Image (spheres, rainbow, N blue to C red):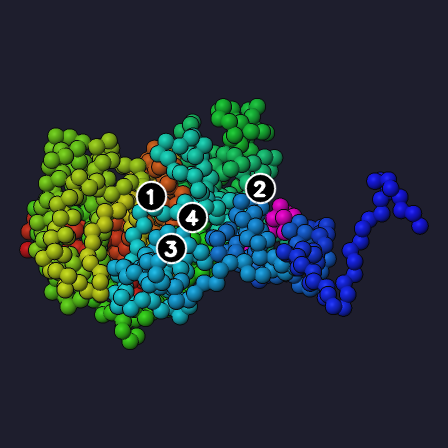
Amino acid sequence: MAFSSSPAFATPLHPIPPTQQQPRPPLPQPAFKPAIPTTLPILLPPPTLRPLAFRTFTKKHNLTLNASALQAFATFIGRHCGAGWREEGTGEKVLEEAAKLWKAENGGVIVEDGSRLKGILKTLEGGMSGGRVGVVGAKVSRENSFAFGQNDGNGDVMSVDRPSLDGRNSSFGISKLHVDEDGEQDEAASKDPRAWLKVISASDQPRFSYDADKKHFVQLTNKPSFFPPPSHKTAVFRERYNIIHQRLLRNEAFQAPSFSSRSTTLKRTDSTTTQQFYKITPIANLLGRGGTSHLLLGMLVIAPTGTLALNDPSGSIPLDLQHAHPLQGEDSSYFCPGMIVLVDGVYEEDWAGAGSSGLGNTGGVGGTIGGRFLGFSIGGPPVEKRSVSLAEGFGWTDFLGLGSERAVGGRMRKLETRLLDTEAEGAVSEQRRKTIILSEITLDRPLTLTALRKVLQHYSTWDDPPMTLVLMGNFSSQAAMAGAAMGSIEYKELFNDLAAVLSDFPSLLRQSTWIFVPGDNDAWSSAFSAGASAAVPREGVPDVFTSRVKRVFATAKAEAGAGAKKDGLDGEAIWTSNPTRLSLFGPAHEMVVFRDDVTSRLRRTAVSVGQAAKRKGNGEPDASASQPQQENDDDNDDTLMSGALPMRGTTLGDEDTQMADDNLATPVPSSTTEYTTQQAKKLILSLLPQSTLSPFPLATRPVYWDYAPSALSLYPLPHTLILADAEAEPFALTFEGCHVINPGALVSGSGKREKVRWVEYDWWRKRGTLKEDWVG
């Protein structure tokens, strides 16, 4: 055969096969083996994935997926898990890991599509192999994750003076609180519970807003401002209404029964059966329903026409309280403009005038329903216990930035028991777990310095000094820098005199934490308020005035030397805001400290109800509310909530209630004790149901709009509320698990019979004891 000579048809030259004498060389191995995909992506509809997502997120992890998040998970599982997502269980594993990562990143109860979920899916994508979830992160060593201090780079942990509670870490503050599953901690801080004390000022507290649509709290990440837009002003009152409304709907008296043979009409009877429940009617729904009974929830306001009105998000209606009586009994609480109340009554439609059948009456006030609402019963919404609030979906919310109740609450309580319970081995003494609370320390009065020295001399003789001393203003009896009598130089001299007194007690300075809370007469806000109510929350006393006090602490520490330290913890002075919050062992113990003469403000602005309204005119302040009752109220002292609407958990005379007047060092007349207890109950029933420290209009008590929803919030209820009111008598009472204490003014009385009064608070028992002694 002749071979072609054309290059296009040339016969290729094949290699000659090797002979047996010449073995074939080995073939070169490829540099890499191509990855053959073993999982083919599919299109997974979200409704198909919904049952598995509900079982994993809702039933197992108490989370809720919205539609956008469910679509994101369906797309991710269909792309990476393929057709075997159900049979092989790979889809459930992806949802399980995603739920754990969502909780570890402090996500809310509602799982929604966003940057956080996209980051979680990206993390899971990096660990996917063959349609299965592999290692999504580095394994955390128990030895390093719960160690105190910071790593120096060589694997050793550097020691510090106290465990840090700052910063935001994973697992809702478990690593942030540095405690393991059994409640153990580093030996350096295991003997002094003061290492776990945290003072949270108003500017450092996390800011949350309640989302009525999602029904959970959303953390605000925008920077707060002292000059926010006007929309934030209305958001303050809307936030208060939404919190109280969702709290009220969980009350048993407002829950409709699942099966009932009776009508759901609100009936006016003396007793309530299990079939009856109450339904809140929006004000806008009153139109066209004249002569019918309704229960309204709204805010008391003074309308531009000068009459008393009730507002809610749907509208406003004039309110007539001439025939009303308080739900808790006569003279049981104050009702002031700005408070959110429940009013039970009848709507009377005004048929005279063009605006009677729609929004806007003849008075020209937009949004006002024509006619009036004739109230028969009025009262504050029932209070919800802290345990109930945290169990109803808010247990994962970190209100203080120290870890949520569900994440670290149990571990912190174990640690609290080990360090504070005197029956536990290694616990501190009963003296060490005390906090001393003093209020109205007017340093420009020489008698105040004498009284303060007397109190400090008493505690300097203790074998174990108290854990904390809380000193609250006003530190000046006159508004600082608001006139010639108290300028900046004179104001600074007051703290120089305080430093001279504190220098005589070096042991207390070295081993206790001193917390200073300002009042309305303290700088800088006093220079603009001139003695009137300053805007809250307000920052602490500036450093320019307190430098001498800080120098006293440094001197006491230097004189003692390093050998005088106790458990590595030194005494310190903290100048914090008003109000402020104290936390011991994270969420296990929360205390709110607020210095404000709230009782006098309640008396000045309270509206008249019932017969007093007929005599004085509806909407005018009731001066008789500040007078003691003449009739015998022994039958009503314990039952604080009674009347037409039976509310759950409304008694103050249970086993948790303490009449602190029995703890007075000097007995007082029984009539004075009864009057003090009655006024204390009236203050508690007026303030706690409002879930805020300032239930007043902005003209009466100014607040900073961006800080008020969180810094002034009383939801969930704290374990202890220190409400320092210098114009009210001291008391210590417990209501719905919240222990309310008023230490009163440090010096009281006149002439030669002046007393010094303060409070000893036990962190383990969560109870305060009133103390008093003669100054001379």
Q: From the image, tell me which residue sits under label 4.
A: 380
Q: Is residue 514 above or below residue 480?
A: below
Q: Amino acid at mark 1?
A: Ser
Q: Specify which label sits upstream in the sequence, 4 or 1.
A: 1
The quadrant in which residue 30 appears is bottom right
Element carrying mark 3:
loop
Q: Amino acid at mark 4?
A: Gly
Q: Are marks 2 and 4 in contact (CB under 8 Å)?
A: no
Nearest the viewer among 384 and 34 is 34
Q: Specify which label sits upstream in the sequence, 3 or 1.
A: 1
Provide residue 383's location: percent of width, then percent of height: 43, 53
Q: From the image, tell me which residue sits under label 3.
A: 402
Residue at 73% over, 57% down: 83
Q: Are marks 4 and 1 in contact (CB under 8 Å)?
A: no
Which-is-in-front pick, marks 4 and 1? 1
Q: Specify which label sits upstream in the sequence, 1 or 2.
A: 1
Label 2 to label 4: alpha-carbon separation: 22 Å
Which-is-in-front pick, marks 2 and 3? 3
Which region of the structure is painted magenta?
62-73
Q: Is residue 319 above or below residue 109?
A: above
Label 1 to label 2: alpha-carbon separation: 48 Å
Residue at 50% over, 34% down: 316
Q: From the image, tell me which residue sits under label 1.
A: 203
